[in-house]
Each structure stands twice: as structure tokens, then as C-alpha cells.
Amino acid sequence: MTDPLDDLREPVRPVAPDPAFAARLRARLERAVLHPNAWENAMPTASAAPSTAESLALHTVTPYLTVPDAAVALAFYADAFGGVRRGEPIRMPDGRIGHAEIALGDSVLMLAEEFPDLGLVAPARGAVTQSLRLEVADPDAVVDRAVTHGARLERPVADSPYGRGGVVVDPTGHRWMVSRETAVLRPGDVGYASLWTSDAAAAAQFYGAVLGWTAAAPHGSAPAIVGGQDRRTAFCCYAVADVDAAVELVRAAGGTAAEPTVRPYGRVADCVDDQGLRFAVFTPPAGTLALDIARPGALTSLAIEVPDTGRARAFYGTVLGWGFAPGPETGAWIVRIDDRDSHPTTGVADGRDPVIVPTFAVADIAAAVAAVRTAGGTAEEPAFAGSDTYAACVDDQGCRFSLVQY
């Protein structure tokens, strides 16, 4: 006898998978296989809560200073270095502060007042036994502020092969190297950038009001402004070890490339990738420093948006040797060079038209957002993303960009 359920059962008819669902599933599987900790290690979303001084984890080494007057020291580190106090100081029965903490950026500084009976005394003037290096975005401003609040200037701020910085001795006698590190340009990094727009004069006025740009220079931390363009985007010139070999790779990968020409900063070739995005490659002199991405107003990261991220990864992996790690969103990728982030940090994501969206550093994002709106652009409200605060903006000519406050 035939089972009635067999007669009622519909025959199996294979159904073609939804392409969008299949793409999302493939991306999630790639993320899990290629980078098992991608969800934890990826760039945080805008909903992430900001870190606070109280929640900072201690690093492997934490400085613990002896000072003659803890109240004076804490006030100086807060006023001059932007420190945030962690909890209340612990006072000993005789009134001396036996322990206090203050957060400087992502690090914790501990201090206590002198206890000569235990051999703990503050350094005498001119008899410092160690130096502390403080990494900041703007060493000029921090050193000036430190001197204003009572520090002694030991070495004025100046450029050096390893960055820019100066040295001060604080009011408690401790020596601080206030510095901003500058990396050496690697093959695959952005050597210089331009901001393409239709009206260069109007753009200079807008970004001068928002970011404080006074003059655009192709090698500076701020991009040059190029007018007369029908596409509003950032234009990047990438460092390569051999520009002639890179030109051949561009052509082999499906792009186009002009013959290299000699310019003051190296041999350069203008190129177009296989999705219509224009860029350039150049061979810089040995030891050329990378872009200074921490200075206020500087280009600090880039988002390359293309119709097909798979093609982009194949193209730039071939031409520039880029590697890729899964990004924070489905279909997004973070560029890696020698297992480290590119400089500036660069991401590749889905987009309708090929375009590069730049992000610029600011010291006060609320003031910068207000300046964008006053200058005729639009700006979203700032949102936290990990330890930084971002705002997506559009200038008065329709060019997209973002702001980040460190």
C-alpha cells in the first residue's frame, strides 16, 4: 500500500540561491576562515562606547613617579598634557599623597610624594635619571602649553629623522620627550594625495575654514587641491620599489598606465585601475618619510569605494602588493602591508561609483562639524568608534569626507 504522505509530498525542485544572500554568506565565511577573530579585532562600529580613564588597562610597563608635591604634579599633567585623573588620591596619615593615577592617552601614569625614609625622592633640578616619552598629535602645541604651565624648556620642538618633538622638564623635575613619530614610507603606502574638485579656490576657502589649511603642498600632511575635475574624489600616489615594473603590472592587471616622467619627488606614472579609478605610482628617494597623519588637518585614513571589491583586491594586490584583512562590515577589507596597516590606514568597500573618501584629523570635532555647516557643507553628528570620534561630511561642492578627533 502506498504511503499517503509520499503521495502528498511535493517533488524536490532545486532553487537558485539569491545572489545577494550568497554574497553575504560568502563574505561571512571568508571572514571566519581567513580571520577567526575578525569580529573582535575589526574597526569598532559607531555604537561602541568610548573608553574612559577608569576603564584603561595597564600596559606591560607603567611609570611610577616620585614627586615633591602630588597636587602640583596632577594639575600640571592635566593642564599641560591633557591628562584625566583616575579616582581619588590615597592620602597617608601624615597628609602626604601615597598614591595617585592619571591617564595620558591610552596609558596610565602613577605617582606618589617623596618618602626619603624609603629612599624615594624626586629628582633634583638638573639631576634627572630617566626620560618619559609622550606621544602626541601636535608636539608644538603641547610643549608650548607645558611651558605656559611651569615646565622648563630643555630642547625646542624640531624635526628629526624619527619624527618631530621637543623636551621639557616638568615642575616636579621629571624630563619629558614630547614627540610625534613619523614613519618611513614603504612600498604600497600613500606618498602624497590630492583632493579633486571643480573649483579649487572655493575648496581652499572651505577647507581652510574647517581644517585650517593655509597652503596645499603635494608632500605635506594636507592634500593638494586640484580644480577643474568632474569627479569629486581623493587622488592617491602610491610608493613602489620600481615604477617601471609597477607600470607593467598595472597593464597586466587590466588597468592603463602612462609612461613614467621625472618630477622633483621621484619618477611618477599616472594610472587608471580596471574599474576606472585614477591613481599614480612613484619611486621615492630612499628614506623618504611617510605622511604625517597625526597633525590636525592631516589626511589620516582613506576609504576606497568600488563596484567590485574582489576585482580591487586582485588589482591592487598585484600592482602594490597589498594584503587584505576582513573589515568591520560585510564586503569591506582593510589594506595590510607587511602584516601591518597601510599608512594612512586604507579600506576597500562596496560603492556604486569608484571614489576615494578621505578622513582628516581634527583636535575638536564639535567645532569642526560646526565649521563645516557654517562653510556651506553638511555634517552628521559626531559618533564614537572605539577610542576615536568620527563625523561623516560633505563639502560645499559635493565631495564626501570624514573627520576624526583623536
Image: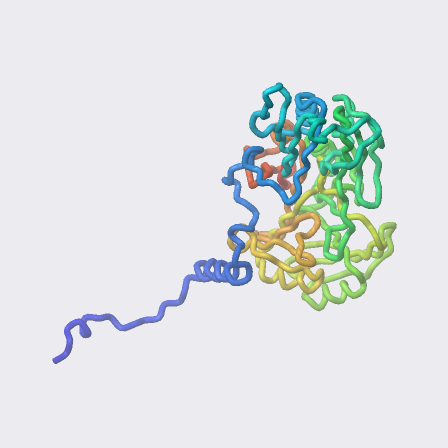
What quarter of the picture does the C terminus occupy?
top right
Q: Judge left or right: residue 207 versus residue 86.
A: right
Where, by quadrant of the figure, is residue 296 drawn? top right
Q: Judge left or right: residue 288 versus residue 231.
A: right
Rendered residue at 60%/23% (across/down): 92
Q: Is residue 110 above or below residue 358?
A: above
The spot of residue 202 in percent (x, y) is 72, 34
What quarter of the picture does the N terminus occupy?
bottom left
Q: Is residue 286 above or below residue 295?
A: below
User: Depth check: 106 or 388 in front?
Assistant: 106
The spot of residue 73 in percent (x, y) is 69, 25
User: Depth check: 199 or 380 in front?
Assistant: 380
Where, by quadrant of the figure, is residue 250 drawn? bottom right
The spot of residue 192 in percent (x, y) is 76, 48
User: Depth check: 10 or 92 in front?
Assistant: 92
Where, by quadrant of the figure, is residue 114 drawn? top right
Q: Judge left or right: residue 89 versus residue 235.
A: left
Q: Is residue 39 above or below residue 403?
A: below
